[in-house]
Image (cartoon, rainbow, N blue to C red):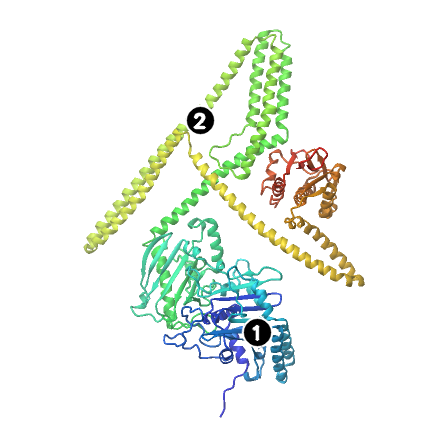
Amino acid sequence: MAKLRVRARAVDMLGRQQIAGIPTAIHELFKNAHDAYAERAEVDYFRRTRVLVLRDDGYGMTRDDVENRWLTLGTESRIKANRPDSIENWTGPKNLPRRVIMGEKGIGRLAIAVIAPITLLLTRAVRLDGLHDLVVALVHWGLFEQPGLEIGMIDVPILEISSGNLPTRENVQELISRVRLNIRELQDELDETEFVRLNSELDKVKVIAPDKFDVTLRKLLKKDEAPLSLSGDGYGTHFILLPTAEELNDDIDGRKAKDPSNIDRFLLGFSNTMTGEAPVIRTEFRDHHLDEEPNELIGPANFFTPQEFNNSDHHISGVFDEYGQFNGTVRIYGESHPFVCNWPEGRGKTIACGPFSLEFSYVMGRPTETRLKLDDFKAVTDKLDRIGGLYIYRNGIRILPYGNTDYDFLEIEKRRTKSAADWFFSYRRMMGYIAISHEDNGKLHEKAGREGFRQNQAYREFRYALINLFERLALEFFRETAPQSDAYLEKRNELISQSILLKKQKKKADERRKEFKKLIDAFFKAYEASEFERRAEKIKTRVERKLERLLTLEDDGALALGVRELEADTGGRLRELEDDVTITKPRGLALTTRLEKDWASYQRVSNDVREKISTPLRKEINGLIRDATSSRITDAQRRETVMELLEKQKSEIVRDLSALRNDTYSAQEKLRTTLKEVVREEFGQFRETVEKLLIDFTRQSAQDPSSMEEARTTLEQELVRIRERETSLLEAIKRQMIEFAEGLRERETVDDRVGALEQRAQRLEEQLEFYSDFAQMGIAVGILQHEFEKTARNMRVAVKDLKPWADGTPDLKKVYVRLRNSFDHLDDYLKLLDPLGRRLNRTKIELSGDEIRLHLRRIFRRMLEENSIELVATDEFLLRKVKCISSSILAAFVNVVDNAIYWVINGAKGEKVIRLGVDNDGYLISNSGPGIEERLRERIFEFGESSKPGGRGMGLAISRDTLQREGFDLELLQAGANIEPVFRIKTTLSENGEES
């Protein structure tokens, strides 16, 4: 009698054909951990060695389980496990709530072969009778790929290890030897190339030592977290898989920055964490790069958090009953509405799929239409773009591929593409889940390849009921003409109006700030060009020449008249000069931080101009005129002249203010007219709307008297809504008018109020932006330092190892020299971090100017030479010594000189030189680059302030702060656009030049 025989390749084909890829395979192994009542399942992937370790804390397997279940295909042990009368009620040593078993076909373990050709299985069972011995097995899946081999020809060696010990490298070597022997026995059945490959893959297992792995993985433990270890009293199942398939790196890294990787798509949200309840099982995936902290890929924060889920714009939740009718709540912008949705196609019959629940949140696509804060909106939108969708969970465990952005099984995007106005929802703007259970939805069967549900009648009705709900939601709540769209449209339009108002206000304020900045820039341009001094000198010279001509007049009356005209003309010119010096800050205008600093600089410099130029000039001119004419013009005549000038000035002021007063009256009249028109229009529209409603009611009640009560209720509700809307508007206008009047009495304008709010908002925005940038810089600097030191260390070793070969190989010697020079250049920059790395050593040392110069030359030697810049130090500088914490002084010198090099390269017109000197108060650093404007004297030390393209504005700010904490200081001693900049590192010195 013939018998059915099974080739070994059947195992490989079953595994590969039912599993789409590595992420799906890991998903299957997570489900196996769930079925073993594990609370944690974690993956650690070591890229360099291509080893993947998957561990769980489930109840593990005995040797009998491994031989008769795990190594047996299509086992029936779990077929009846989900039945209520199942005797398999033990839920592990922690007595966890009973779970629905996810794997019933008995072939899910074959997923392992997709990940890597070799599996080292370690499992330790815990049962009612206590802990069992550790079982270790080595499976070479490559043997199952070979044609012509029967399953029975392939051996899987097994070891048992007692006393809570872990296998050593020697134990693993014993298993390798037994597999190698099996391969040798099958050599005649194998292709020569395959024979070599199988042995080569087996060689990679030699380095595996599970006991050492355990030590390494324990270091990754979080605080108060128990180790996933099989040693001691530990139990569970561990898989060590190697060498992993090459596509795993691509599955992790993805192809595009904004697109999710395959690991994200298939492993995020394995358990439902959106509800805020503790997940049935917690899963993690850590990606280990060489000598780096592992990257956690699927932690809880990577998926949708309960806060994100609950704080969205819209939220829909409810239950589909056995007839396909949805009964739930629709929350629109925080306002809840009960909603019942019938499914007409069900025709009152029970649906084959059974009852289930749905809950999802929705975020509007435009920032102008969302109630979320801008930063929250951006964060959740970025996440939605990557992993947004509707997930399906059976008893708390995700069903693949539902939730993936490219698996829109309800055709939500297809309908939206046809008509966005009618079909509101977008698949990528939602986060949510459909909850089904084995008990209620047993007819929803998964395909073997984890490609969704089989399209039987149960699935079709399940899908149609959901599609019907999304269509009814759009038509009932979110379309312009929808019956219950009021809440959505009013709040959305309110948000849009607020956004438009804010944009208008910002545009107006930006224009005012722009004009204000032009005035300040013009002032400083004139100041740096010594324009005020030239004009003052010109006025004085003109007065002197005029006086000379007037004094030649013999008639005293003619002289007095000429002097009066001269004083009037000179007074006008002086006022013009003072007007150009004077800038008035617009009332209620919120200034940016930079503009605020410019305004502070202007106030300081303009006062200086008045004190040193305009005020002394006025006194000097008055003295010149008085001294020159005192013998010929009496005090009475001079008093009369002054009175005339003051009267003329008063008349000009009165004329200007009168014009403004008349403009104010005109604006007030315009306001009254506009107010009357708006109120009249609103009242007219109200009357017209009410009349139309009454006409409709009259017609409807006459045509259908039986519906009169319903029509009356609808009319009354509409009248109340209109009244509330109109009352709200008119009350707001009235309140605004009253507040406006009260503000005028207090001499307070709307600009003052708006400006105060805008100023606060401006500061908060700038603060947020600054802290965000600062945090990114901090992270980047930390990574840079870590990477820099590690890379340099590795390069030092590599260069050192290369030298003996280079010494004996002339061609290689040239390459070695170039490599060595390049590394020395890199190492120079690494030395910049040396003082930072010694911050724990706070001992003060005596530092000489010569040591400072050598430090600067060591760091900047190449830059100075390549750009022909001289670094010149005076003898006094070289001999000066200071007792200090060296890192503080050296870092300050490095920052100042680094800036100086940049500006000398990009702005020096003659010699290129940086000078180091001293004075009685400290060290001086000057350069031949462009000068620094007076208004920037203090601003350059502000954090985030930089004139360099792409500069971060950190160096000088940090240097000054560090020096001040050490009792020193950093200041700009010499400022001016056309003056060579001089910085001083101020130290506390005694008379003999040594620090006291």
Amino acid at the residue labelled 2: Leu
Q: Residues within 10 Å of mark 1 (few under 14, many from 20)?
A: many
379 horizontally vs 204: left or right = left
| Residue 210, image x, y percentages | 59, 70
Name the element at disc 1: strand
Q: Which mark is residue 992?
A: none
Q: Earlier in the sequence, mark 1 or mark 2?
A: 1
Q: Nearer the viewer, residue 838 or 403?
A: 838
Q: Which residue does the numbered mark 1 point to in the structure image? A: 120
Amino acid at the residue labelled 1: Leu
Q: Which residue does the numbered mark 2 point to in the structure image? A: 660
| Residue 131, image x, y percentages | 49, 74
| Residue 271, image x, y percentages | 45, 64
Quadrant of the image occupied by residue 958: top right
Residue 286 seen in render: yes
Name the element at disc 2: helix
Give the quarter of the figure containing the C terminus: top right
Vertical side of 767 occupied by 570: above or below:
above
Q: Residues within 10 Å of mark 2 (few under 14, many from 20)?
A: few
Marks 1,2: beta carbons within 8 A:
no
Residue at x 35%, y 39% (from the top left corner): 732
28 horizontally vs 851: left or right = left
Vertical side of 168 occupied by 561: above or below:
above
Vertical side of 921 occupied by 826: above or below:
below
Furthest toward the front, the residue is 163
